[in-house]
Image (tube, helix red, strand yellow):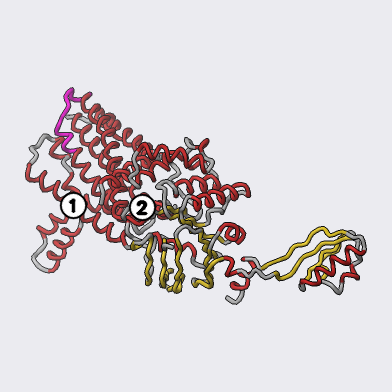
Amino acid sequence: MTIKILKVIALNTFKEAVRDRILYLLLFFAAVSILFARVLALLTVGDRAKIVKDVGLASISLFGALMAILIGTGLVYKEIEKRTIFTIISKPIRRPEFLLGKFFGLVLTLFVMLLAMSLIFLALVFVHTGTIEWTLLAAILFIFLELVLITAVAIFFSCFSTPILSSLFALSFYFIGHFSWSLETFIKKARPGATKVLLQVLYAVLPDLENFNLKTEVVHGLPLSAAHLLYSAAYGIVYTAFILALAVLIFRRRDFV
Amino acid sequence: MKTVLAIENVYKSFSTGFIPKKREILKGISFSVAEGEIFGYLGPNGAGKTTTLKSVLGLIFPDEGRIELLGRPHLDPRAKERLGFLPENPYFYDYLTAREFLDFYGQLFGIAKSVRDERTARLLKVVGMDRSSGLQLRKFSRGMLQRVGLAQALINDPAFVILDEPLGGLDPLGRKEIRDIILNLRREGKTVLFTSHILQDIEMICDRVAIIVGGRILSQGKLTDLISEKVLFTEVTVSGVEVHELAALGESLTAQADRVLLKVVEEDKVQDILALVQKKNGRVHSLIPRTQTLEDLFVDMVKPQ
């Protein structure tokens, strides 16, 4: 595995993504959605800044995830379908290098897009509060970690399934991931027995993307616990590595016909 | 002579459909390509040509068999460093310009920037695409893609070049240009393997060929060994002689105005015809001895399948 090859493929993937019109369409709607928070704030009685922050962060998370899914699910599939992969694999590179290069290319793209959305968001917050709130950046950093994980999931599905199916799978992953925390409450209430064990297994297997959601803390100015942040970061990195390893396993033995 | 590519007893089958049904594509392929030759891999559509190449390139994994590329196991990246490949109906990143495209492939080989720039410019010129170098590939025609694809296959100055249907989608002039490039590669000491189902192309430039039909190699060897040099018959066009006078000497194929086209099987009869024409003060317009062509051979082989 060489860093150089990873870099070449990642940069080319970045080029591919930023020359894709769908990215700008999503960025446009993300901007509209973030700015829409301003309209909602005007209609609100009470702390308007909170609404702006809440809606803004939610928009960044949702549109970031959509970018990761809509671009990520086509990345590998398109290469196979359009047979561009033929000339790549015939070069002196290993298959995992190709797959990981694609992954890092999309991560780089999302980083840049997140930066653009954050600028709009932070400017809007600045208009409301007159200060730049650095804790918001912490929330955005964890959204980025979530997007990295979703990118890995999208690429994983893209290794063996069509973009439409992969998008459905990855979107399900996103939504399940954001609601799986409610299982926790369920487990607490369940009586000991088979049901409880089953729920516990399910909770362990399903992703918990709420780990990356710092909205409540940041918006309401609650203290951020270092232990929780560390746990969430580790959770994201380990989960991403696990999904990527699965993707590599599938991709390595695949025939490109 | 060193062997550049050795394929031994390669089998490959695919399972397709909801209820998987095994389809054997390669049924024990063996052949080898020697250094410095142009090797033609010939077969009808669906015979397994591309599947063989994909196995060599590591795009698919054969069920059985051994492939050695440039003296190493074929999946070794070091072997691929000296390999160039042009796929059939090339599809490339259409969001790149021709120059960016070649540069990208150069980077995959870890070629230094100055060398890359020089090679990209030179190769675009060689394939006649230097004027379109700033254009995105999505705006290219099929023939143009074929040319840029060939340039891509040469970006690492390979010792061995594999070309899948390199002459497909080109006009006659384009075909000649690509043929010349291939011949030039041999002059530079490179080895070329290319597939085609067009016999003239192979006949014109290949040193050796292998013929694959239905997943099996039916024949391989030097072109001169495969095709007999024996004259099968001679076609003679004459005028100034009546058809019925020629009837005993050869089979009259067409007779237009006073020109007669004769198919003459025995060689001494050709002399008789010439003597007759001279005697009658007629004219000989053409005299073509027909030897066996690759096409005849090919048709003979494909037929019993």
Identify the disc placed on residue A124.
none
- Left or right placement of residue B202 versus residue A199 in this view: right
Q: Position of residue B82 (x, y in %)?
A: 38, 53
> Which numbered disc, 1 or 2, marks the residue closer to the eye?
2
Depth order, front residue of A199/B53:
B53
Depth order, front residue of B197/A115:
B197
For image coordinates 21% across by 42% down, the residue present is A143
Depth order, front residue of A64/B212:
B212
Kind of element beneath mark 2? loop
Identify the disc placed on residue B81.
2
The quadrant of the image that shows the C terminus of chain B is bottom right
Q: Position of residue B18 (x, y in %)?
A: 41, 69
**Does the stretch in magenta take in A132?**
yes
Depth order, front residue of B293/A197:
B293
Residue range corresponding to the magenta coloring: A127-139
Q: Is residue A248 above or below residue A112?
A: below
Q: Mark 1 sits on what residue?
A: A208
Q: Amino acid at mark 2?
A: Glu
Kind of element beneath mark 1? loop
